[in-house]
Amino acid sequence: MSGPQLITILGATGSIGLSTLDVIARHPDRYQVFALTGFSRTRELLALCLRHTPRFAVLPTQDAARKLQDDLAAAGLDTRVLVGERGLCEVASHPQVDTVMAAIVGAAGLRPTLAAVESGKKVLLANKEALVMSGALFMQAVRQSGAVLLPIDSEHNAIFQCLPVDYARGLESVGVRRILLTASGGPFRETPLAELHDVSPEQACAHPNWSMGRKISVDSASMMNKGLELIEACWLFDARPDQIEVVIHPQSVIHSMVDYVDGSVVAQLGNPDMRTPIAHALAWPDRIASGVAPLDLFSIARLDFQAPDEDRFPCLRLARLAAQAGNSAPAMLNAANEVAVAAFLDRRIRYPEIASMIDEVLSLEPVVEVKDLAAVFEVDAKARVLAEQWLSRNGR
């Protein structure tokens, strides 16, 4: 490839987007920003545009886009500002784009990420909901388009690094016995169960090891994040749910492991910094500097492991059941969780009610086959209605 790779970053103002920009800035000869997208942090997106001078930017509303366009013009930039989901899909699938960082959180990231896949891009997948909601359809699009799909979640990136290059032939055919998916256990790993009723959104968002957005921080506290990652891993690595074991590892130094039939366990280690998997995926199959400090094993001194307690983390149990059921169940799970986490962050429900709401939503609808993207969004919408009805019934 001649010249730098042109990169679109979906979700540029979030933690993954900012880390991606940090890595890109370290290698101006290899990478150039093509498009940046944001949602509500318009000032931050303006600052990023002024620094990285993308050809396109995207915001969700006409008013916000018009304001950003005026501000960029006043600064002498000719960046073109697009609007809404249509704009996201345009910059994700643009013929000049080489690589797309898919880092929009939640269901909103599905269509633009799929647009990048269908256009045959190199897609760095940080939006786990895309596979959770539409795994079969998504992976079929990857195969048909020839897109290169590389995982960005630290755990999935670690698994990718620990597997042989020909794992696509099937895990058992390359001697894999289990995938060991590590989890920090979040801020409530040792909190007495009776105290979980009164924990606040601020406590749930205070992750001990990682700096993340509020929604994903709550998911980490409830271990729904790990449940979604389990579903995602099934699709990424063509694994059954029973081939994936979740292991709590509080230090967040081992990012995941692969257990082989000969007794070998291959692990990927590193400091808890998302620039490592981002740099790995950007440069794959090469390696580039990420800006992450070398791992100091002597200061860590110990590595601990424990099995997750499903009484403490009922969301993990619900996610595993959804993975086993397949079809529409994961999309229902994801939608109900998004509504529940938003309600918790708005102080409309208590922390344990996140799992209660999801459990009830899943029990109210039969699992059905989803044959196209329209069916996926129909399931998603139905689950959100049921979750809102749960809130109304419970006086919220």
Image (spheres, grey):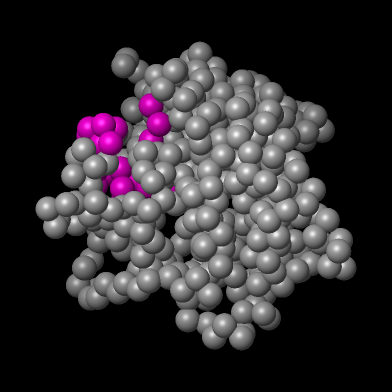
* Front in this rendered view, residue 39 or 235: 235
Is residue 161 in sight in this rendering? yes
32 sits to left or right of 302: right
Query: Residue at left 69%, top 24%?
Result: 86
Q: Position of residue 281 (x, y in %)?
A: 35, 37
* Front in this rendered view, residue 195 or 347: 195
Q: Position of residue 48 (x, y in %)?
A: 57, 39
Q: Position of residue 246 (x, y in %)?
A: 39, 61
Stretch in magenta = 148-170
Is residue 74 in sight in this rendering? no
Query: Residue at left 47%, top 81%?
Result: 190
Asked if 351 appears above or below 29 in the picture, the reply is below
Asked if 197 appears above or below 174 in the picture, the reply is below
* Front in this rendered view, residue 31 or 259: 259
Dividing the picture into quadrants, the one containing residue 80 is top right
Query: Residue at left 36%, top 43%?
Result: 239
> What is the residue that sits farthest to the left in this orientation?
262
Query: Residue at left 41%, top 50%?
Result: 241
272 sits to left or right of 96: left
Dividing the picture into quadrants, the one containing residue 145 is top left
Asked if 269 appears above or below 52 in the picture, the reply is below
Dividing the picture into quadrants, the one containing residue 110 is top right
The stretch drawn in magenta includes residue 150? yes
Which image quarter is the N terminus in?
top left
The stretch drawn in magenta includes residue 80? no
Which image quarter is the C terminus in?
bottom right
